[in-house]
């Protein structure tokens, strides 16, 4: 059996990529992550009957012939996946350290969904309107509706094809403009208050820390997006103390700051402009010191 997996805290690009990979491999199982972002969860609840996903709670151990990883290069823990299970990676995050025996299709585009849309086009497949809408959400969310610096002409061409497949812009706009929850709003205010500006190699970097309120269980990425839009820094580094760990969320708007380097140094991952790490063995104070040390090496020296 072919199993399609993605990362935890799955966003629209991750889930849309799973759908596209399933369209290319109809006999496969697209297994959702245990945690998906709030706007993705709301979309899936509304359109569940029209989509082919399996919830994590419904998964039972099976013999797996191959895993397709989309929008990630880390195999999540799933019953039945062995260390020698063949893996194929489809991702838009160019990174080092991919296992030599894995098959891979990795290109630096605005969204992983774009790569898979091109495969759908090449296979001569068509989409139902709700499928096209989900794929459009995958591209739009990761490219800021085609406005982020990582956006390419291929992302725009893929989005245009999805509109030809009757993707619904009104639905896409509804799920891209989800307001922050009360928990997220409180965290946002605390991070804004605690923001410090650093200047390294000519780059303005916003660095903020916070202690989340008891019982916080929402995603921090939406808060990071709001802060990035409000502050417009070259880089944004957030460290949030949760009940059992410290969460790092990092964003960059320039190739001169590689936030994936920081995340990997703390056991996480991502790509040069968006990365995260779950830090289990450090206090918030110690995590700040560790990030500051990594940050100095993550910024490229200015040309003089």
Image (tube, grey):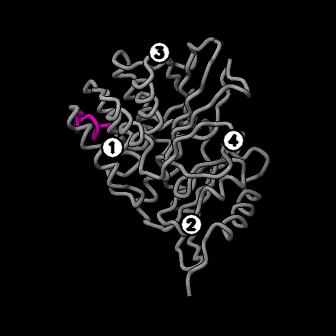
Query: Is 211 drawn above or below residue 124 in the view shown?
Result: below
Whole-percent x, y for residue 283 in the image: 76, 52
Q: CA distance from mark 3 to mark 2?
A: 41 Å
Numbered disc 1: secondary structure = loop
**Eye-nearest disc, 4 or 1:** 4
From the image, tell me which residue sits under label 1: 177
Which residue is located at x 39 percent, y 39 percent?
Answer: 138
Query: Is 272 drawn above or below residue 241 in the view shown?
Result: below
Which residue is located at x 67 percent, y 47 percent?
Answer: 268
Q: Earlier in the sequence, mark 4 or mark 1?
A: 4
- Is 143 inside the magenta-drawn segment? no
Q: Earlier in the sequence, mark 3 or mark 4?
A: 3
Q: CA distance from mark 2 to mark 1?
A: 28 Å
From the image, tell me which residue sits under label 3: 27
- Report the label total: 4
**Eye-nearest disc, 2 or 1:** 2
Whether the residues at callouts 3 and 4 have beta carbons within 8 Å, the answer is no
Q: Which of the two residues, 81 or 257, is positioned nearer the viewer here?
A: 81
Q: Earlier in the sequence, mark 1 or mark 3?
A: 3
Which region of the structure is painted magenta? 167-175
The image's mark for residue 99 is 4
Label 1 crowd (10 A; few <14 / some 14-19 / many >=20): few
Residue farthest toward the right in the current orientation of the protein: 281
Q: Quadrant of residue 201?
A: bottom right
Q: Which of the two residues, 35 or 125, is positioned nearer the viewer here?
A: 125
Whole-percent x, y for residue 84 in the image: 72, 27
Numbered disc 4: secondary structure = loop
From the image, tell me which residue sits under label 2: 257
Residue farthest toward the bottom in the current orientation of the protein: 304
Q: Earlier in the sequence, mark 3 or mark 2?
A: 3
């Amino acid at each position: 059996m072919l199993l399609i997996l993605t990362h935890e805290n799955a966003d629209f690009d991750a889930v849309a990529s799973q759908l596209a990979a399933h369209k290319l491999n109809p006999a496969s199982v697209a297994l959702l992550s245990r945690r998906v972002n709030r706007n993705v969860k709301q979309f899936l609840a509304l359109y569940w009957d029209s989509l082919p996903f399996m919830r994590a709670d419904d998964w039972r151990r099976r013999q797996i012939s191959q895993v397709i990883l989309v929008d990630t290069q880390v195999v999540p823990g799933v019953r039945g996946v062995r260390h020698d299970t063949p893996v194929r990676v489809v991702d838009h995050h160019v990174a080092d350290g991919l296992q030599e025996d894995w098959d891979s299709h990795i290109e630096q585009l605005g969204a992983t969904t774009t790569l898979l849309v091109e495969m759908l086009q090449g296979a001569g497949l068509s989409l139902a309107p709700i499928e096209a809408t989900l794929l459009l959400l995958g591209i739009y969310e990761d490219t800021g509706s085609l406005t982020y610096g990582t956006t390419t002409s291929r992302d725009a061409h893929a989005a245009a094809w999805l509109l030809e497949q009757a993707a619904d812009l009104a639905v896409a706009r509804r799920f891209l403009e989800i307001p922050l929850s009360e928990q997220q709003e409180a965290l946002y205010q605390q991070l804004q208050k605690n923001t410090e500006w650093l200047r390294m190699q000519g780059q303005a970097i916003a660095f903020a820390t916070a202690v989340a309120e008891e019982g916080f269980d929402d995603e921090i990425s939406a808060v990071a997006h709001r802060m990035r839009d409000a502050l417009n820094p070259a880089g944004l580094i957030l460290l949030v103390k949760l009940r059992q760990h410290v969460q790092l969320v990092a964003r960059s708007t320039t190739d001169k700051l590689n936030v994936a380097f920081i995340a990997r140094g703390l056991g996480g991952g991502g790509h040069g402009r968006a990365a995260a790490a779950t830090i289990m063995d450090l206090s918030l104070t110690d995590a700040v010191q560790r990030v500051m040390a990594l940050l100095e090496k993550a910024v490229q020296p200015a040309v003089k």
